[in-house]
Image: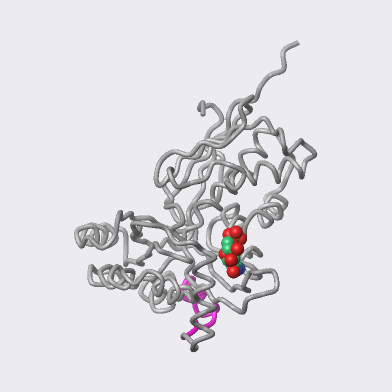
């Protein structure tokens, strides 16, 4: 009797922006304690996982050339981690992963982490695993600090390394403009730069997350705009001074506030509404301060299966 090969599974997964990113001290394990508020945005990658005799990762789309496809690729690490977790052979998982990117690579929007989260969700469906989101998030945290949030999406408070996630109820939609820079930034280098800046002086730190949570629940983008903050911004701007010009250009174009997203260099601008975001995006694109401009809204849901028929 012929074994029935399950069809490929496609998962859509969101980018994130940190509305609040408070960075604590460097820990012995090389990470920093974080208190952060994530929001998942309607800027998504698509990941298809399929049973295949020629295992590996393929990457297409935005920044594909700069994504490693070997063992260091986070999606491949996700394949190995889940295989190990469920007793399959991690060295021969017989899986092919095809990633179609729209999230900028090394952009501070957790694109690689998103692809790993999508791979976990896709494989759970492909392998017909009885596994909860919380169990997948536990495996996700071993792959990278931002991977668990991409499993849940929405708006969430992240603590510890940013990988302990508590969902935040947020019924309001916020409108964003994203400015991609010409080159990516390395996350560890940005954290190192913050440690260096803090050793030299004491750059201002963001306030408490509670105020941001209140701003979120008000649903008023003007209130939220006053509360956005990112401790990594000073470090990203120190490494990439042109971001100062990008941030200014977005606010001059009519955004309520602009901030570096995560470790950068993507800049995220909060706007009054969808129409305003489109106007800000057009003006920012014309200002010539960045490579590409996108509009997005948040929150959106986390990694979710969108199809099981499409061939990879
Ligand atoms: O977990 P992930 O591989 O995404 O983290 C990339 C790097 O970012 C870490 O190796 C570390 O240098 C830095 N990082 C940190 N503290 C965190 C998260 C990330 O220092 N909470």
The N terminus appears in which quarter of the rendering?
top right
Residue at the (43%, 64%) spot, across then down:
264
* Magenta segment includes 209: yes
Residue 283 in the figure: left or right of residue 174: left
Q: Going by the picture, which residue comes out furthest to the top?
A: 1
Closer to the camera, 186 or 286? 186
Residue at the (61%, 39%) spot, across then down:
122
Q: Where is residue 44 in the image (x, y as percent from the top left)?
A: 45, 48
Residue at the (60%, 52%) spot, across then down:
151
State whether residue 84 appears in this view: yes
Q: Quadrant of residue 158?
A: bottom right
Q: Quadrant of residue 131?
A: top right
What kind of secondary structure does the magenta stretch mostly adopt?
helix
Q: Is residue 192 above or below residue 110?
A: below
How is the rendered protein coloured?
A: one colour
Residue 233 in the figure: left or right of residue 76: left
Q: Going by the picture, which residue comes out furthest to the right?
A: 87
Residue bounds of the magenta highlight: 204-218
Q: Is residue 9 above or below residue 35?
A: above
* Magenta segment includes 75: no
Residue at the (31%, 58%) spot, across then down:
274
Q: Position of residue 79 (x, y in %)?
A: 66, 41
Q: In this view, does 204 lie above or below 249?
A: below
């Amino acid at each position: 009797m012929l074994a029935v090969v399950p069809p490929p599974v496609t998962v859509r997964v969101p980018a994130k922006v940190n509305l609040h990113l408070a960075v604590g001290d460097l820990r012995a394990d090389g990470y920093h304690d974080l208190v952060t508020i994530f929001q998942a945005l309607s800027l998504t990658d698509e990941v298809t996982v399929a049973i295949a005799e020629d295992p590996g990762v393929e990457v297409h789309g935005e920044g594909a050339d700069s994504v490693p496809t070997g063992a260091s690729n986070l999606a491949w690490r996700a394949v190995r981690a889940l295989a190990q977790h469920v007793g399959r052979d991690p060295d021969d998982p017989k899986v092919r992963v095809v990633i179609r990117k729209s999230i900028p690579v090394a952009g501070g929007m957790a694109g690689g982490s998103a692809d790993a989260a999508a791979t976990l969700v896709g494989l759970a469906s492909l392998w017909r695993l009885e596994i909860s989101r919380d169990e997948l998030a536990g495996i996700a945290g071993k792959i990278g600090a931002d991977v668990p949030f991409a499993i849940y999406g929405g708006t969430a408070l992240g603590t510890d390394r940013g990988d302990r996630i508590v969902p935040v109820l947020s019924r309001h939609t916020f409108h964003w403009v994203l400015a991609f820079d010409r080159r990516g930034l390395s996350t560890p280098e940005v954290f190192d730069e913050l440690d260096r800046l803090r050793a030299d002086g004491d750059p201002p730190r963001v306030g408490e997350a509670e105020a941001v949570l209140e701003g979120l629940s008000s649903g008023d983008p003007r209130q939220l705009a006053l509360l956005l903050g990112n401790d990594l911004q000073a470090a990203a701007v120190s490494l990439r001074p042109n971001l100062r010009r990008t941030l200014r250009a977005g606010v001059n174009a009519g955004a309520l506030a602009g901030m570096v997203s995560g470790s950068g260099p993507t800049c995220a601008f909060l706007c009054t509404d969808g129409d305003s975001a489109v106007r800000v995006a057009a003006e920012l694109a014309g200002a010539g301060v960045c490579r590409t401009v996108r509009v997005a809204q948040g929150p959106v849901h986390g990694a979710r299966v969108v199809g099981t028929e499409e061939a990879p």
